[in-house]
Image (cartoon, helix red, strand yellow):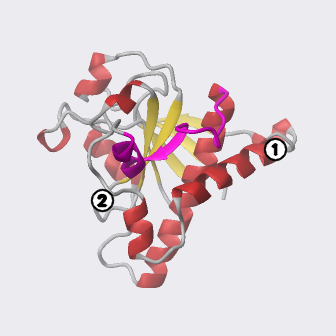
Amino acid sequence: QQMEIIEAFAAKNKCYQAGAALVPRGLMLHSIGTPQPSAAALARYFDQYQPGGQSVCVHAFAQADGTVYQTLPWEMRGWHCGGSANNTHIGVEMTEPSAGMSYAESAEQITGTYHAAVELFAHLCETYGLDPLADGVIIGHAEGHRRGVASNHADPEYLWQQYGMGYTMDGARRDVAAALAAKNTVEEDNDVIRYHRI
């Protein structure tokens, strides 16, 4: 699948309006924790002052077909982890299977979303000169909590374990490193990431 980034900035969101600067030193992977496979629907939902009455906003939502809806500029501080990693890490949410999906459909959705996140992280590591295998550069929300830089959540591993997918954050870091290495060997014109605004 070809990754496609659609700029859908959440301009009504309190976090976007605060507009604090971020120098990305890492990437944090989240899973949304609710049955919603559409990144577009989530981007629309976050385009309000306080979604669900909370001051929250991530940088992007990834969905299974490779489409990524970017809700904050990468160099704007997000409110995605309830801790100090908001000051250092870009936050990306993976969408999750809807309630009515079969196990096979759910597994396909999770797999597609995982690969979209890996491609996005490889792109961001390339953009910001980040080493995906260096300590603390790519972390999940749960790992952030264990490091004392994020609130207590079990994502994204909890979702992968629920469905027996075999994905781990260590594996994700290795996959991002492999995708980054592959990007550096592919000719530039084959590796264009298309940006669209909506």
Which residue in the protein does label 2 denote?
Answer: 33
Residue 138 forms part of the magenta stretch: yes
Instruction: Please give the name of the residue rendered at 42% of the width and 48% of the height, measured from the top-left corner.
Output: 143
Compared to residue 2, the image places residue 164 above or below, namely: below
Q: Nearer the viewer, residue 6 or 130?
A: 130
Q: Position of residue 59 (x, y in %)?
A: 42, 36
Is any part of residue 139 visible from this angle? yes
Question: How many labels sit on residues?
Answer: 2
Residue 190, which numbered label?
A: 1
Q: Position of residue 49 (x, y in %)?
A: 19, 30
Q: Secondary structure at mark 1?
A: helix
Q: Label 1 sits on what residue type? A: Asn
Instruction: Please give the name of the residue rendered at 67% of the width and 27% of the height, measured from the top-left corner.
Output: 129
Among numbered discs 1 and 2, the one appearing first in the sequence: 2
Circle 1 or circle 2, nearest the eye: 2
Q: Secondary structure at mark 2?
A: loop
Category of crowding for the residue at label 2, using alpha-carbon neighbours closer than 10 angstroms: few (below 14), some (14–19), many (at least 20): some
Answer left or right for 45 relative to 75: left
Q: Quarter-wise, where is residue 96 in the image?
A: bottom left
